[in-house]
Amino acid sequence: MYRKDGKDYFIFDSHLHFWDASPANWVKGQEEYAKGWIECFHAYQGLGPAETHWSIEKFMKYSAEDFEKDVFEDGHVDVCIFQPTYLKEWYADGFNTSEQDAVMAARNPEKSIVNGRFDPRDGDPGLHQLEEDHAKFGLKGVKLYTAEWNSGSRGYKLSDDFAQPYFEKCIELGIKNIHVHKGPTIWPLDKDAFDVSDVDKVATRYQELNFIVEHVGLPRIEDFCFMATQERNVYAGLAVVIGGLMHARPRFFAKVMGELLFWVGEDKMLFGADYAIWEPKWQVEGLVDWDYPDDTFSDYPRLGVDGKKKILGLNAAKLYDVEVPAELRLAGEEPAAREAAQLVES
Amino acid sequence: MTKDDVLAALGTVYDPELDEPITALRFVASCEVAASGAVDVRLRLPTPQCAPNFAFLMAADARDAVRSVPGVGAVSVVLEDHYTGAEINAAVASGGGFGDAFPGEVEGELDALRTLFRRKALVARQGRLMAAVQDPAAARLGDLAGPDAGRCRELRRELGIDASDDAPAFVRGDGTPVPVSELPRFARMASLTATSLETNGGVCRSLLQVRYGTEEVAA
């Protein structure tokens, strides 16, 4: 919970990681990729405030205590989702698996949600694994990384035929939140890997599922926004938007927020710190304080206290059926107030 | 033939995603011209994992641009510090295409991708120009001036869209004029596309700065 100017904000961080990218975990012969991946993430950390930068050594492997201090103690986070990224071609035990996350989550079970993953190229064994993971972790969501390299393939699309049984399995198991993370490669390599039209197709097909597009489709924010206006069940994950732009490029941040508020709306935007790339503290505090820098942004919708409360926590809490303490809900959403409103309306 | 001639040629090579010259983006790490006329160009990108297709286009376009400079001898263009650098560099050195770099992993060459991003670039440039035009429906291409207008003409020529002075100033990516009734929405979408490209350019500049310690340049 974060309090500022007498207002209390419930903080639901929809996107963070507990990874091990230390050299001991690099797959032999794949060191270049394992090293390149974590160095790339580390460069992104450079877009945050200087006092939040870590050494590459700490960044490769941080402790459970680091996590708890940065996220729960200093970071104001009430509930968080661990989003896995396996990358087992490059990291022997995986970069950040649900198993690793579950160990971390068990230290703070009331504050932690473990998400799963699948790779549709894994066929029937993958479907079986998803069932097992669901039984083990009680999954409400999965995170998909479409650019993952797998046995000679450098990626896939959600609309690929072989992916469809997985979405049907998610519906059957009650896994209703699908976080989509696009990366630089898909098959075939001559197509735009960041294209989000495959999300559009499956969002239309599977109305029971919610699709949270991480980093709002960046670098294809325009395609994401056009798509999100058409699909009721598509949400904007703000990981990277806040961490990567709010400090480093504040005017671009204002424009992107303005566009998202206009096209997608404050009810469908979800805060995610993307820890350990960026610590939540400065992002939460910065977003609560944020406003457009000047009146050249007057074409865009305003973001008020209620909107910030939704983005920082209430929207994601709804998707994950997390109960928000009554005093942290919006005024109109408190049960007593709702009953009163119904009486008046009837 | 001087180094400046080679750099000028490299200045005509655009990052297809950002629609900016690779020289302005500081993607040219070094450019050496030997007495023999041999040219060695090194390219660098903001992350080791920038998309291989766009990375290939920039490297291959740089190769072709430098080769076209009169008096140039052997040309070597090398993409540094990239996770598919070995594949890309081998194909670029042998004069091959994208399919030669990644055999079995492509369905076609990169023409469709290039066209798609030229269309985006055209829409984005128009988004910026439109804000300053009184009556966009009546405006002709010849009414527009400045760098965005110049780049629009280039993009239109590359896309096979009429780029003459009396052509409609504002067209969709496929070249069809925007009907008056759709202008407000088109303006909004074009402005969003411009924001997207500019933001990506900002992120790329920031990451390049972190990666290589390059000095900040105004975005």
Image: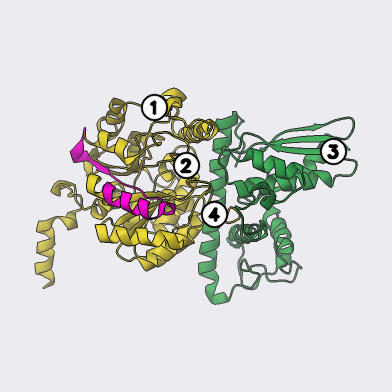
Q: Amino acid at mark 3?
A: Ala
Q: Are marks 2 and 4 on the same chain?
A: yes
Residue wearing tag 2: A250
Label 4 and label 1: CA atoms lie apart by: 31 Å
Residue wearing tag 1: A61
Q: Are marks 1 and 2 on the same chain?
A: yes
Q: Residues within 10 Å of mark 3 (few under 14, many from 20)?
A: few
Q: Amino acid at mark 1?
A: Lys
Q: Position of residue A146 (x, y in %)?
A: 46, 51
Circle 3 marks a residue in which chain? Answer: B
Mark whose residue sits in front, 4 or 1:
4
Mark whose residue sits in front, 2 or 4:
4
Residue wearing tag 4: A187
Q: Which residues are magenta?
A: A107-133
Residue wearing tag 3: B74
Q: Residues within 10 Å of mark 4 (few under 14, many from 20)?
A: some
Circle 4 marks a residue in which chain? Answer: A
Circles 2 and 4, Cβ within 8 Å, touching? The answer is no
Circles 3 and 2, Cβ within 8 Å, touching? The answer is no
For the N terminus of chain A, which image quadrant?
top left
| Chain B tint as drawn | green
N-terminal of the pair, mark 1 or mark 2, is 1
Any idea which chain is the yellow one in this picture?
A: A
| Corner quadrant of residue A123 | bottom left
Label 2 and label 4: CA atoms lie apart by: 35 Å
Give the secondary structure at mark 1. loop
Give the secondary structure at mark 4. loop
